[in-house]
Amino acid sequence: MRTIAVDIDNTLWDLISVFYKHMKILNPAIPPPEKWRQWGCWMDYANERDVYGILRDIHMVQDAFGVYPEAKEFLSILKEKGFHIIIASHRTKGTMDATVRWLKKHDLPYDEVHLSYDKSILFNKCWAIIDDSPETLDKAVEAKIIRAGLRNPWNEKKEHPLFDNLMEIFQYLQGQCPTHAQ
Ligand SMILES: [Mg+2]
């Protein structure tokens, strides 16, 4: 069985719109997300403690939010193809309950949930990682595992396999794994 790690924020749901609303209250000078051309550029508009506070507050009520249209279909088809799915998110472990409630609320199939500030510790047991963070995708290159992500302003200049929706990512994975995912 092949293991795949799947990110949550900006992979299974639109975190950035909610995060931007909070950041704009904190610092109205912050430009809109379509101008966030570099990973972490939001750190220029607030201190680290405030940014992590906003993210924790959002993640604590994760189950109040929706999912991307293909999130359920994407995870369901991976499950159907026999993958072991680790939902892996950069967030504090204290948000586990809200995260699991969100997964169940939207009927998203998974096998494990991993919450930490370094998901690359999973890479030695993963065949692939799906994530939008260029830092995580770079670590996947180092670990020599398959990687892919949704295209966003903060990653599109990087040399990674990026796609416009999750089902395109599934098609890409199929190509990487012809005997398993067809
Ligand atoms: Mg993400």
Image: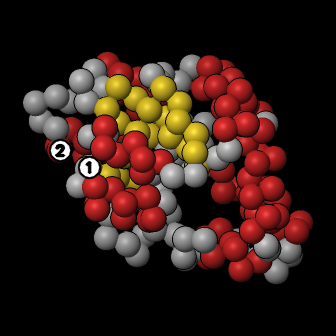
Q: Is residue 116 left or right of residue 59?
A: left
| Residue 7 in the image, given as x and y percentages of width and height | 49, 44
Q: Amino acid at mark 1?
A: Ile
Label 1: few (<14), some (14–19) or many (≥20) C-alpha neighbours in 10 Å: some
Q: Is residue 118 left or right of residue 157?
A: right
Q: Is residue 15 left or right of residue 28?
A: left
Q: Amino acid at mark 2?
A: Gln
Along the viewing direction, whichever of 139 and 35 lies nearer the viewer: 139
Position above or below: 177 against 42 = above
| Residue 22 in the image, given as x and y percentages of width and height | 83, 59
Residue tagged 1: 146
Rendered image: mark on residue 176: 2
Do the CB atoms of the residues marked 2 and 1 lie less than 8 Å apart? yes
Q: Quadrant of the C terminus?
A: top left
Say which residue appears at 71% left-offset and 27% top-offset: 97
Position above or below: 6 against 108 = below
Q: Is residue 150 visible?
A: no
